Every structure is written in structure tokens, then in C-alpha cells.
Amino acid sequence: MKFTSEEILETIGMIAEDKLDIRTVTLGISLLDCSDPDPAVCARKVREKIMAKSADLSKKTDFVANEYGIPIVNKRISLTPISLVVPLAKPSAFVEVAHAVDSAAAEVGVDFVGGYTAMIQKGETSIDRALIEAMPEVLSTTSRFCASVILASTKSGINMDGCYTMSQVIKDTAGRTAKNDGIGCAKLVLFANPVEDNPFMAGGYYGVGECESAILVGVSGPGAVRRALEKLGPDAGLGEVAETIKKCAFKITRAGELIGKKLAEHLGVVFGNLDLSLAPTPAEGDSVGQILEIMGLAMPGAPGSTAALMMLNDAVKKGGLFASSSVGGLSGAFIPVSEDASMIKAAESGAITIEKLEAMTSVCSVGLDMIAIPGDTSAETLAAIIADEMAIGCANNKTTAVRIIPAPNKKVGDFVNFGGLLGKAPVMPVSQVSADKFIKRGGRIPAPLQSLKN
């Protein structure tokens, strides 16, 4: 891959002025050879493999970042879903393995590890039930291990019993981490149609279709896209806007692929894929919401927000796919409330609501992300919110997710503050109209007609 001097100088400018960075390099590690019915032995095998595969991850990542002058913000690990590794239906076994993972992650110097994962879209096993039962303890007693549960897919429909169970897990986890505004819930993602090569946390896990070990790169560049649109000016047509975003995404992807391939080479593993997701941070100027404002919306949540976000997401994907044959993961635009300065302001002012966010998630990457709601929200209402988002994923054959925090002892208008990339968020109102009887029917919503494609 050759770069012109003009491309290099332009990339330097994007780094210096537009907050372009590699948001995460994530090392995927298969744990399929670590299974053991003895929890202590399983925990030891898992720890030893993490240590062996990722011992040089932090050092090599820093070396590549310095060599090319591109900041790499986070170093992470994704693991084979633990539900496939711990062959024992005892919650204590999952707690023991989770603590071993968290300890290894601290020792090798990564920010987060994904893979405390259960796949129950069509029903649960006794092992899945044990993993889920242990989840509140794991999320409240570890600092780096992240959890995810697959509740739905276009092929299987929606596990409504699972939605209700997970709403209770969320409530329990929030209570156990109440001193930190329920931060345990920020490490738990509920999915419809997840991908197996997602480098972003908290929802990343390393799928069983992946190789032994691979580097997965998550690039971010909302600041670069915003600056490009500012230079374009307010009188450009929407076709020009889309073309500008596409060209910018192309350049961002090229930089990310270079870093990913070099790091994989240094670590002696496969370069897996590049996830071109515009992932914001609370820092001013590093916001997806501000891109929507540059497009002409007074604030995210205004009429037209869904259309603008669809265009942004589509242009990002088109630019990335043209730049690399290894684009994967989620690749699009994230709209997490607490991690985006513009979204925080929109939520605080009431310009954006949970219902509007839900509509926007039909056209963007993932879903209801990092949303704080009143701590006294019932488990039934929470389950209904989760089910709505799962339905969008199933009907549209796309990945959707929920990462929601019922903030203990907080009411509408209060703030939760998690610090760092997790940011802060106002507690948003939730509809008081009951869905209790619907949720308590239980069972599974059948797969939609879209599933019949064979």
C-alpha cells in the first residue's frame, strides 16, 4: 500500500486538528481449547492463554502508534463467549473464571475485555442460566470484563423471557454499583443480530467462526468528518454532503488499515478486520451529533434527524468499503448519549427522547446506547424497551443493541457521571404507560417473514 505525500500531510492534519485516532485495537483470542469441568483449571487455562497471546499487546501497540504518529486510544481483548468455555452449570464457576480474566487483563494492560457472553436468542441452556445468574456479581466485582447477551435474531425471533430476565439482571447490577451511578450496567450490552468481529466494547466478543487470534481495529473520525463538512460550506446540496463524507471515510479507513496490518505483523497474528464506526467521545468536536448539526439540524432529535443519520451511515460504509476489502464489525455511526457532547446537550434540553433515539437506531450502528433512565423504572418497562429495540433489529435484519442504565436513586433531570470515555448523561424520562401484561405473557416472538430467505 503506497501513500502520496499529499495523503500523508492530509492525514497528519486530520490527527492534529480533527481528533482522528484509532479508537481501539482489539486482540481476538479463541478460548475453545481452554474448556475444563474443573472451574479452577478452566480459570487457569483461560488466564494462561490470555497472558501468552497478549503479553506484548500494549508494548507493540505503543510502538506502532509512535512509529506512525497516529494515537491509539484503547487496547482491548475479545474472547470466545465464556458460555462455550465453562462446561459447568454453576454460577460460582463463572465468577471464578471472570476474576481470572479480569486479573489477566489488568496485568497485560488492556482497558476492557469482551466475551462474558450468552447466546439465548432461541432459548437458554442450564449453562446460560448459570452465566446470567452470576452476571450481576461479575459486573460489580470486576473492572474490565464486559458482558453481552444475544436475545434476538432475524432467523429466530425474540426471546421475550430473556428480555424480562435481563431487565432484572440490569436492575440488580445497577443496585450493586449504586455508589458509581450504576456503572456496572455500562458494561452490559443486549443484542439482536450481533457480529462476531466487533472490536468495540462493551459488546465485543470473538465468534466461533474466527481464527485462533486476530487484530480487530476500530477507527473513529467524527471530528474529521465534521471539519470536512465545515469546509464544504452551508450551501452545498445533500448529494455533495454525502460525497464529502464518503471521501473522508475513505481516508480514515486507509489510515486504520495501515495501523491494523502493521500491528498484526508485529504480534505475529492475522489482521482480522477494520470497523469504520464513527464512535464519539465527550470531548468537544469529537461528536456524531455535531455532524448532524453541520448538516443543518439545530440539534440531534430535530425532525429530519433519522434521514440525516441514514445518509451519514450510508456514506461512511460506502467510503470504507471502497478503501479496504477488510471492513467488518459494525461500521457506521454510533449515537451513545453519554459519550457524545452534542447528544448530551440534546437529551438535557429535551430535544431528543428515547422514542426518537429508537427511531434513529433503525438506520445507524447498534441502538439505544448509554442511556440513563430513572432508577425506579420497573423491570417490566425496561424489558419492553429492550424488546422494542430487538424488534427493530429483527425486522430490518441488522444489528441493534441496548445499553441502558436505570440510575439508582436518580430521577429525570439528574445526571450520572461515569468519567473517561463513558462520559456523563442526564436521566431521561420513560413512558409511564404500562406494558406489564404484554411482557408477562412470556415466550418467544416468532421470526419475521424476512427470515425465510433459503
Image (cartoon, helix red, strand yellow):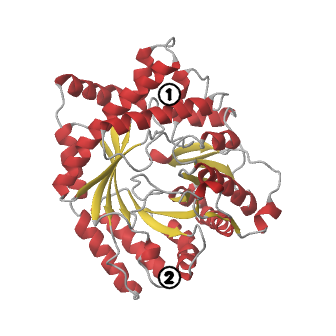
Q: Considering only vertical position in the picture, is 279 above or below 125?
A: above
Q: Secondary structure at mark 1?
A: helix
Q: Position of residue 50 (x, y in %)?
A: 29, 69
Residue displayed at 60% across by 70% down: 122
Q: Secondary structure at mark 2?
A: helix
Q: Quadrant of residue 76?
A: bottom left
Q: Quadrant of residue 220?
A: top left
The first of marks 2 and 1 along the sequence is 2
Q: What residue is disc 2 on? A: 92
Q: Position of residue 354 (x, y in %)?
A: 68, 43
Q: Quadrant of residue 9?
A: top left
Residue displayed at 36% across by 39% down: 321
Identity, as a three-letter code, of the amino acid under mark 1: Ile
Q: Considering only vertical position in the picture, is 374 above or below 47?
A: above
Q: Residue furthest top?
A: 235
Label 2 packing within 10 angstroms: few (<14), some (14-19), many (20+): some
Q: Position of residue 253 (x, y in %)?
A: 32, 37
* Camera-side residue of 163 and 239: 239
Gap between marks 2 and 1 measured at Cα = 46 Å
Q: Residue furthest front?
A: 454
Q: What residue is disc 1 on? A: 291
